[in-house]
Image (cartoon, rainbow, N blue to C red):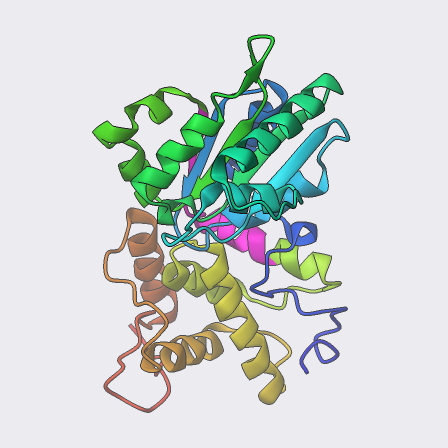
């Protein structure tokens, strides 16, 4: 739709995790380093947490894409509370199939698989995304799986990826043994203003964009209303390009971006900024001083934002 109008090879702000669009902010680079270190150092348990949409799954796809040949990986991408038989899911993650319904038999088969991988000088890593959805009993079961060893070496590494609630769960008294196994942990935070503008430019460049499609005020408003969450940035920028195409606007400016924000918030799903951080408050103040407009739209009115002189 808008890709040809803006001379783009493809949509730059897809919501699907895509390692080819990975923007390594300082903290995302640190998180990636910690993940790789956890794997290479054979850490028992690695935990990466962050808010919804901050890029955890994209980082997971990145390490999977660049995994070394001596690492065997099992991935459970959408953990949930009603897992049922955890061991069955784990075996499926490693493409291990058995028709035997006896849990003890499956445990023995999985143990033999891990020891076989170890004997071939391979590391075995189990990655669980959305781990905050797992029940206490399931997490404890995972800890027991990490007890399997050969020649006094742990033969299963565990990587837990989840939302901040995972940290609260891990601090429960019942999970203190699992928490003590955590060798590497890192908490991803939202992007700052400069990182958000760099993130927008990065994705446009990867998609073949040659010019500055979003002006600095539009990018600032995207940061303000997304709070630096990459998934929300993608949502706003994608909508803005659709609006820009419809209006045949060569550049996304402040007024157009605010129209997008207003329409998205009136829909009732896109979150409103209720607690400004210092950077957001400063941006709101600067735009009001320089452009004479509040970046928070009045949702009680239907007309377009009005620019007035200070």
For the point 77% across and 68% down, the residue is 9
Q: Which image quarter holds the C terminus?
A: bottom left
The answer to which image quadrant residue 29 occupies is top right
Find residue 259 and report its horizontal and vertical position in percent. 42, 81
Find residue 262 and report its horizontal and vertical position in percent. 36, 79
User: Is residue 110 rendered to the left or right of residue 269?
Assistant: right
Find residue 50 and report its horizontal and vertical position in percent. 41, 44
Stretch in magenta: 184-200
Is 196 inside the magenta-drawn segment? yes
Placement of 197 over or under 272, stated as above or below: above
Residue 157 visible, this orientation: yes
Residue lying furthest top: 151
User: Is residue 304 rendered to the left or right of residue 203?
Assistant: left
User: Is residue 18 rendered to the left or right of residue 174?
Assistant: right
Q: Which image quarter holds the N terminus?
A: bottom right
Placement of 290 over or under 120, stated as above or below: below
Residue lying furthest bottom: 302
Placement of 267 over or under 212, stated as above or below: below
Placement of 116 over or under 107, stated as above or below: above
The answer to which image quadrant residue 122 occupies is top right
Residue 32 visible, this orientation: no
For the point 53% across and 75% down, the residue is 240
For the point 24% across and 32% down, the residue is 172
């Amino acid at each position: 739709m808008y890709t040809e109008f803006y001379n783009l090879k493809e949509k730059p702000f897809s919501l699907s995790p895509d390692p080819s669009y990975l923007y390594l902010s300082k903290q995302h680079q640190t998180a990636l380093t910690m993940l790789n270190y956890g794997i290479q150092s054979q850490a028992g348990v690695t935990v990466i947490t962050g808010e919804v949409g901050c890029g955890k799954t994209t980082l997971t796809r990145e390490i999977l894409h660049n995994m070394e040949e001596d690492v065997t990986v099992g991935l459970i991408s959408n953990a949930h509370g009603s897992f049922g038989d955890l061991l069955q899911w784990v075996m499926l993650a490693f493409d291990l199939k058995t028709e035997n319904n006896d849990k003890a038999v499956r445990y023995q088969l999985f143990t033999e698989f891990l020891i076989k991988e170890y004997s071939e000088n391979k590391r075995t890593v189990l990655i669980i995304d959305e781990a905050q959805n797992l029940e206490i009993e399931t997490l404890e079961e995972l800890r027991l799986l990490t007890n399997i060893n050969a020649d006094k070496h742990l033969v299963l590494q565990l990587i837990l990826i989840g939302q901040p609630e995972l940290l609260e769960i891990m601090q429960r008294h019942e999970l203190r043994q699992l928490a003590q196994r955590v060798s590497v942990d890192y908490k991803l935070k939202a992007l700052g203003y400069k990182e958000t503008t760099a993130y927008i430019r990065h994705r446009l460049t990867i998609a073949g964009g040659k010019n500055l499609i979003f002006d600095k005020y539009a990018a600032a408003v995207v940061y303000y209303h997304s709070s630096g969450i990459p998934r929300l940035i993608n949502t706003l920028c994608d909508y803005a390009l659709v609006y820009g195409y419809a209006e045949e606007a060569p550049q996304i400016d402040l007024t157009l971006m605010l129209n997008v924000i207003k329409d998205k918030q009136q829909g009732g799903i896109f979150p409103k900024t209720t607690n400004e951080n210092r950077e957001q408050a400063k941006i709101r103040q600067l735009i009001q001083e320089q452009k004479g407009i509040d970046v928070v739209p009045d949702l009680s009115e239907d007309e377009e934002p009005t620019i007035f002189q200070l």
